[in-house]
Image (tube, rainbow, N blue to C red):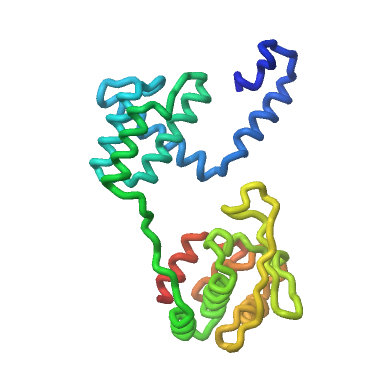
Amino acid sequence: MTDLIKVNGAVPIISEDLLESTKGYVNSSRSDNTLKAYRSDLNHFTAWASSHGLEALPAMPQTISLYLSDMARQGYKPSTLERRLTAITQAHKRSGLEFDRSHALIKETMSGIKRTKGTAQDQKEALMTEDIRAMVQALPDNLLGLRDRAILLLGFAGAFRRSELVGLDLDDLREEVQGLVAHLRRSKTDQEGEGRDIPIPYGHNPATCPVLAVQEWITASGITSGPLFRGVDRHGNVSETRLTDRAVADIVKRSA
């Protein structure tokens, strides 16, 4: 926060409350997952530097070049190395230390790694309509099957991320003449938290209609508020807590 205290070279009188509030807003500019990733990346770099007898903070361009080369040799992707480079840059800034990410040696090292390793990202193969239809038909005829059917069809119709699906509450759904409108309060692509509405129209086939699937799950589960998608035990009892995005991944794998 040192850079926030000085204004035009002067040191004004600022309350501790204001400094803490400002620090909180600065920290909130990045998601918790991003901050965790940065901390993990920085810890990895400092441990590597220590094991090679090199200084991590401040780091010399030669140290960064050697680190990036070693990580690339071990199979790390260019995208991962770019993120680690960002973490190292941020650590220097927060510590008030000079660090030139655009140094020629660092840029040339990253350029060579990208040219050698390639920058294409591994992508999961997208599910087609026929796949979703087959997955839904294979679900059990019980409460668990109704929930999984609603998750699959709603997720496919709205192109939701797993985290967006499990983050939905019952109050986030609004019935319209054409179907449902799902309100996303926050998502990975909406870091400012303004929210957005996703229209979910009725399907032509009742067996694969996302609106009917969600409505049937709500009715059968008996939920009246709170998380939309929750755990269901083997006795058919519905949990009070929402599913995790990992659980949605397991549902997709199991259904497929």
Question: Residue 12: where, in percent of width, then height?
Answer: 73, 13
Question: Residue 154: where, in percent of width, then height?
Answer: 58, 73
Horizontal side of 213 relative to 119 (left or right) equals right
Q: Nearer the viewer, residue 169 or 221?
A: 169
Q: Which quadrant of the figure contains the C terminus? A: bottom left
Question: Residue 30: where, in percent of width, then height?
Answer: 57, 40
Direction top: furthest residue: 10
Q: Nearer the viewer, residue 142 or 180?
A: 180
Residue at image position (38%, 44%) is 80
Q: Which quadrant of the figure contains the N terminus? A: top right
Does the image show residue 139? no
Residue 135's place in the image compared with 186, above or below, is below
Direction left: furthest residue: 73
Residue 71's place in the image compared with 104, above or below, is below
Q: Nearer the viewer, residue 237 or 156?
A: 156
Horizontal side of 67 relative to 251 (left or right) equals left
Question: Residue 48: where, in percent of width, then height?
Answer: 30, 30
Does the image show residue 194? yes
Which quadrant of the view contains residue 105? Answer: top left
Residue at image position (56%, 65%) is 160
Residue at image position (41%, 34%) is 85
Residue at image position (51%, 43%) is 34
Q: Nearer the viewer, residue 34 or 168?
A: 34
Horizontal side of 154 relative to 170 (left or right) equals left
